[in-house]
Amino acid sequence: MATTDSDSATASQRLDKDTRETIVTVVRHTILLTWSFIVLFPLYWLASMSLKPPGTANSLPPDWIFLPTVYNYIQLIQDSGFVAAFANSLVMVSASVVLVLLIGVPAAYVLSRYDIPMERDVLVWILSSRMLPPIAVVLPFFIIFRELNLFDTRIGMVLMYVSINLSLVVWVMKAFFDGIPETLEEAARVDGATQFQGFRKVVLPAAKPGIFSVAIISFIFAWIELLFGLVLTSFEAVPVTLFVYSFIGSRSIEWGMLAAASTAMIVPVVIFLIAVNKYLAAGLSFGVVIKE
C-alpha cells in the first residue's frame, strides 16, 4: 500500500512538473507572438497604406478590407526623381560601407594588437565623433564641402557616411579582435605566414560575425540618414530619404506615395539582411575563441 502511495505521489509530482513546463512554454510563446505582432504591425500598416487607392490611405476609420492597387508604386517608378534618388542612395551607401570596412577593420586590428601611445585617448577621440549631435556639425561640414567642391557630389556623401559610421566600426571590431587569442596568429607565423597573411587568413575569418554585423549597422545608419543629405545636397546627389521627405508638404501629405516610397526604402535593407545573414550564420558556426 505504501509503495502504491509513493508511486502515486511521484506520478503526481511528475504531472505537476510537466504541467508547469507546459504553462511556462505557452506563456513564453504567447509573449513572443504578442511582441512580434507589436513589432511587425507598423510594417503591415505601412505596406497596406501603400496598396490602398488614392485618397483612402489615411481614411478614418481605416479600411481593413480593400482591393489592393499598385497605383502608388507605378507613380514612383515613373518618377525619374525617385529612381535617381534611389540609385544615388544604393551607390553611395554601398560604397561607404565598403570604404568604412576597409578603413575601420584594419584600424581596429592595430588598436587591438599593438601598443599605441595614448591608446585610450585615441579611442575616446574616435568615439567623440559620434557624441556630438548632427545638427551641431552639419554647418561646418557644409562650409568644408563647399570649399573643397564636394557639395552635392556622390563622393562627398560617401565620405560623410564614412565619417558617421567609422567610430562604430572601430569600437565594435576592436572588441572582436580583443576576443581572438594572439596564439592563433603566432601559430600561423610559426607555419611561415607573414603578419598580413595571419591577419587575412586567421583573424578575419574568426572576426567574420563582427564584420558582417557592423556592415549591417553601417548600411542602415547611412541608408536612413536625412539631415546631412538635406544640407549637403541639392540636385545631383540627393538621397532617397530626402525624396521621401518631399511627400510631406506644408499643407498636405501624400500618404499613399509616402507609404509606397517608405516601403520601397525598406526592401534593400531586407535584401541586404537576408544576403548577409547567410554569411553571418556561416561565420558564427565556426565560433570565436574567447580570450581567458
Image (cartoon, helix red, strand yellow):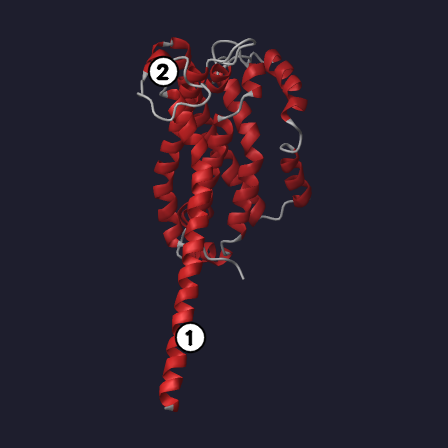
- Local crowd size for mark 2, using a 10 Å CA cut-off: few (<14), some (14–19), many (≥20): some
Q: SS at mark 2?
A: loop
The image position of residue 195, as x and y in percent, is: 47, 48
Residue type for callout 1: Gln
Outermost residue toward the bottom in this view: 1
Gap between marks 1 and 2 measured at Cα: 60 Å
The image position of residue 69, as x and y in percent, is: 31, 18
Q: Earlier in the sequence, mark 1 or mark 2?
A: 1
The image position of residue 259, as x and y in percent, is: 43, 21
Residue 106 in view = yes
Q: Residue at x 56, y 48 (%)?
A: 112
Q: Nearer the viewer, residue 269 or 258?
A: 258
**As drawn, 181 above or below 13:** above
Residue that carries the numbered disc 1 in the rendered image: 13
Q: Residue at x 42, y 26 (%)?
A: 46
Q: Residue at x 63, y 20 (%)?
A: 138
Proximity of marks 1 and 2: CB atoms separated by less than 8 Å: no
Outermost residue toward the front in this view: 1
* Residue 179 numbered mark, or none: none
> In which quadrant will I find the N terminus?
bottom left
Residue 215 in view = no
Q: Nearer the viewer, residue 183 or 94?
A: 94
Residue type for callout 2: Pro
Q: Nearer the viewer, residue 11 or 179?
A: 11
Q: Quadrant of residue 226?
A: top right
Residue that carries the numbered disc 2 in the rendered image: 53
- Local crowd size for mark 1, using a 10 Å CA cut-off: few (<14), some (14–19), many (≥20): few
